[in-house]
Amino acid sequence: MAKYIGVMSGTSLDGIDIVLCDIDNSCCTLLHANEYPYHSALKQEVLQMIDEQTTLKKIGELDVKLGDMFASNINAFITQYQIDTNEVTAIGLHGQTLWHEPNSKHPFSMQLGSASVVAAQTNIDVVNDFRSKDVANGGQGAPFAPAFHQFVFDRLYKNIAVVNIGGMANVTLLGDRYLGWDSGCGNVLLDHWIFTTQGKNYDQNGSFAKSGTVNVELLAQMLNDPYFAKKAPKSTGREYFNPTWLKKQLQDFQELSDADIQATLTELTAQTIVQDLKGVEEIIICGGGAKNSYLCERIAQLSHIAVKTTNEYGIDSDFLEAMIFAWLAYKRINKETVQLKEITGAKKDSILGVLTCK
Ligand SMILES: Nc1ncnc2c1ncn2[C@@H]1O[C@H](COP(=O)(O)OP(=O)(O)OP(=O)(O)O)[C@@H](O)[C@H]1O
Ligand SMILES: CC(=O)N[C@H]1[C@@H]2OC[C@@H](O2)[C@@H](O)[C@@H]1O[C@H](C)C(=O)O
C-alpha cells in the first residue's frame, strides 16, 4: 500500500476536495477527506475567463493563482491531519477545467493550477494534466470516473449504474458491460438559476424545484438539444451547458415562474440521466447531486430502479471524485495504463498524467 493525495475542483466551482488514500492494485482506502473553500475572487475570474475573451498574461497568472490556492489548501489539509509528507508518494491534481474541446480540429482539454507551484509549495511530487494524452489519442479526455468505478464496484457482479452528479453528470454502466459517458448537465444550471433568482448557491434538497411545476413544452425543447441524442463517446462542460444555453432555451418562456423553471431544469437532469440507464438493476449515486433528495426521488420514480448512494457501499459520495485523482496518480507513478478506450473512444489505453518532481 502507498499513500496518495487526490485534489479535485469540479465544474461547480463550489469547493476544493482533498483526500488522502492508501492504494494498491486491489483497493483504494480513504484515510482523510475534507473540502476547502474556493476563493470567491478566483471563482469569478475563472467564470469570466470561460465567458469572455482573455489574454495570455491573464491565463498565465491564473495558472499560478490557482496553483497557489491548491497548494495552500493541500498544506492546510496536511497540517490538519498531521500527515507525514515523506509518506505521500504523490499528489494527483486534477486542476480547474477552463476549457474542454475534444471534438474540434485541434482538440484539447485545459486544466489550470500550476503543478510546479504545488510541488514547490508542498514538497511532494505532483501528477497533473491527466486528460491531454487521451485527447491526443483521439479520445474525449473524459469522463475518467468509469475506470475508477470499475476498479471499485466491479466486484458487485450485477448490472449497476454509477451516476456522478456534479456540475455535469456522468454515468457508468457495469456488470456484463463496461460503458460510460457524460449524460449532460448535472447541477450547473440548477445552481445558476437559483443563484440568479433567489441569491442562493444551490437548491437545498431540491425544495425550490419541488415547489414548482414542470413545464412540459420547455422540457421537451431542452431534451431536444442534440447533445442528449448523441451516441457515446461523449463529454461536455461549462463551454456548452451554461447561462447562455439556458437564456436561449427560455426565450419563448418568459411567463414561467422561477420555481417552475427550477422544477423543469431538475427534471431535465433527472430525465437525461435515466434515459441513459438501460438494463440496470441498481443505481448508485455520488457527487453533490446525491444530496438533492428531490432529484434522487425523481431518478428513482422515472427509472423504477432502486437508488442508493456510494455511502451505502462505504465510499463517501462527496469525495469519490477526489479519490479518482489519487488513484490516477498511483497509476501514473506505477506506469500503468488506464482502461478508458471503451469510454473515451481513444485509439488505445495510455499511461495518463504528467509528473512534476518536488
Ligand atoms: N444538500 C444539497 N441539496 C441539493 N444540492 C446539493 C446539496 N449539496 C450539494 N449540492 C449540489 O452539488 C453541487 C456540488 O457537487 P460536486 O461537488 O459533486 O460538484 P463538482 O465537483 O463541481 O462536479 P463535477 O466536477 O463532477 O462537475 C453543488 O453545486 C450543488 O448543486
Ligand atoms: C473536462 C472535465 O473537467 N470534465 C469533468 C466534468 O465533471 C463531471 C464531468 O464533467 C466529467 O467529464 C469530468 O470529471 C470527472 C471527474 C471525470 O473525468 O470522470
Image (spheres, rainbow, N blue to C red):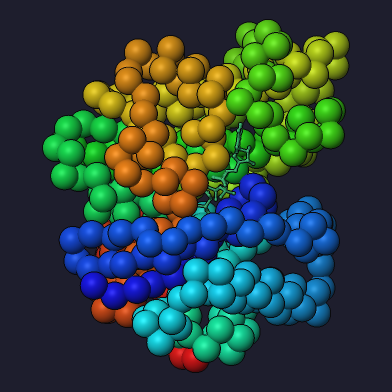
Q: Position of residue 301 (x, y in %)?
A: 43, 12
* Residue displayed at 61% across by 86% down: 121
* Residue displayed at 28% across by 67% down: 23
Q: Position of residue 353 (x, y in %)?
A: 42, 74
Q: In this orientation, does residue 222 appear?
A: no
Q: Is residue 71 left or right of residue 88?
A: right
Residue 109 to residue 154: above or below: below
Q: Is residue 301 left or right of residue 197?
A: left
Q: Is residue 14 left or right of residue 275?
A: right
Q: Quadrant of residue 89?
A: bottom left
Residue 292 to residue 91: above or below: above
Q: Report how many numbered discs are placed on residues in the image.
A: 0
* Residue displayed at 65% across by 75% down: 72
Which image quadrant: the N terminus? Answer: bottom left
Q: Position of residue 292 (x, y in %)?
A: 56, 28
* Residue displayed at 68% across by 71% down: 69
Front position in the image: 152 or 253: 152
Q: Position of residue 93 (x, y in %)?
A: 51, 70
Q: Quadrant of residue 137?
A: bottom left
Q: Is residue 38 left or right of residue 337?
A: right
Q: In this orientation, does residue 60 appear?
A: yes
